[in-house]
Amino acid sequence: MKKVVVGLSGGVDSSVAAATLQDQGYHVVGLTLWLMKGKGQCCSEGMVDAARICEQLGIEHQIVDIRDVFQENIIDYLVSGYEAGVTPLPCSQCNRTVKFAPMLQYAKEKLGIDQIATGHYARIRYDEHSDRFQLLRAVDPKKDQSYFLYDLTQDLLAGSLFPLGNQTKEETRRFANQLNLKTANKPESQDLCLIEAHGSMQKFLDKYINQHEGDIVDLEGKVLGKHQGIHHYTIGQRKGLGIAAAEPLYVVKIDPVMNRVIVGNRAAGGRSECTVSRMNWVSIAETTTPIRSEVQVRYRSQPVPVNVIPLDNFRVKLIFEQPIFGVTPGQAAVLYDGEILLGGGIIEPD
Ligand SMILES: Nc1ncnc2c1ncn2[C@@H]1O[C@H](COP(=O)(O)OP(=O)(O)OP(=O)(O)O)[C@@H](O)[C@H]1O
């Protein structure tokens, strides 16, 4: 019998992923990663719901305490990033270092099972021609989560299944209701798990980073206001600047050395190129010659045409066909060719 370990968060998607694979004849083991130290209400509630689902499906449930790995790879990563004036993207980092790699390792070493599955909306396809596992967008564009999975390695993709990648969220809910799953009508998580747990990113960061007042300045260096810490700001931010001005102002740069937030009009926030580091090539091998593709610089941003110039050390230069707004150091730039995710990396500060 085929065996699979399904990562259960206690939400409807992973519940349906487990039920679907069971339906397909798999022997399913549920596994919940205990992620957060402290209150971590989201995790404890999630663990109970995951346990209930396992009981309902009649499958084994394992809980793995991975709080130290989460602390080191996500909390410390976020705090040092925000202190350095960038806006780190925790989810892709979490997927690779906290979820997929440890889950697959645990499944293989402790349970003797070499396949894991999650409720992510994305698709994996093996391409014989290139002998690579390709990552594709989900068929439901509203739910596509491939952006957050760009950092998965070939080994991790080879060992993973995404049973929901070919269906819409509505179909998932319908299936959950048909099976009367206890999580069928659980509301969608609206935000990053850390934000849900702490109320806001600002509240979370204020626990770790001391407030350190500095200037908000315009592009000429004229002081327009004060801030209580650069970690409260991100590129492209308009709200919460507390500055009255004739035209809308946006954060266009964060200067950690001078402890300054620099603001300008929307045109000033446009970027025509950027450097991307820690490139992970997914569906194609690393390119040594320039290529054209599309790039997404934020989870919800529109893909736009881009020229990709390979550099040394897992870096590339991206040259956009037209200046784009909201290119934010620390966030991921993910390259696509239509539905195929080519690779991605982290946007570097200028
Ligand atoms: N704590 C966890 N332990 C094990 N697997 C997890 C955990 N958190 C998330 N996952 C897996 O990662 C997938 C995507 O997680 P995400 O946080 O994006 O949740 P989601 O899209 O709201 O899905 P769900 O409805 O299952 O919570 C989940 O469907 C689940 O398979």
Image (cartoon, rainbow, N blue to C red):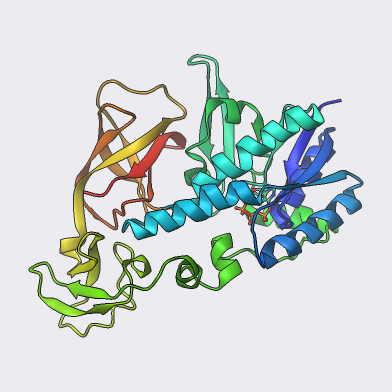
**Rendering coords of residue 302 (x, y %):** 36, 52
Residue 118: tell me if it is visible: yes
The residue located at (62%, 49%) in the rendering is 68
**Rendering coords of residue 322 (x, y %):** 19, 48
Q: Image height check: is 345 above or below 115?
A: below
In terms of image quadrants, where is residue 275?
top left
- Farthest-out residue, bottom: 244
Indicate left or right for 334 with 42 as reference.
Answer: left
Task: Tell me the quadrant of the picture where the N terminus can be found.
Answer: top right
Viewer-nearest residue: 234 or 337: 234
The residue located at (58%, 25%) in the rendering is 155
Indicate left or right for 67 with 326 as reference.
Answer: right
Number of marks drawn: 0
Viewer-nearest residue: 322 or 60: 60
The residue located at (38%, 39%) in the rendering is 345
- Farthest-out residue, left: 220
Q: Image height check: is 116 above or below 266?
A: above
In terms of image quadrants, where is residue 307?
top left
Q: Image height check: is 192 above or below 166?
A: below
**Rendering coords of residue 102 (x, y %):** 65, 37
The residue located at (56%, 40%) in the rendering is 97
**Rendering coords of residue 132 (x, y %):** 52, 21
Q: Image height check: is 140 above or below 288?
A: below
Indicate left or right for 317 with 331 as reference.
Answer: left
Residue 138: tell me if it is visible: no
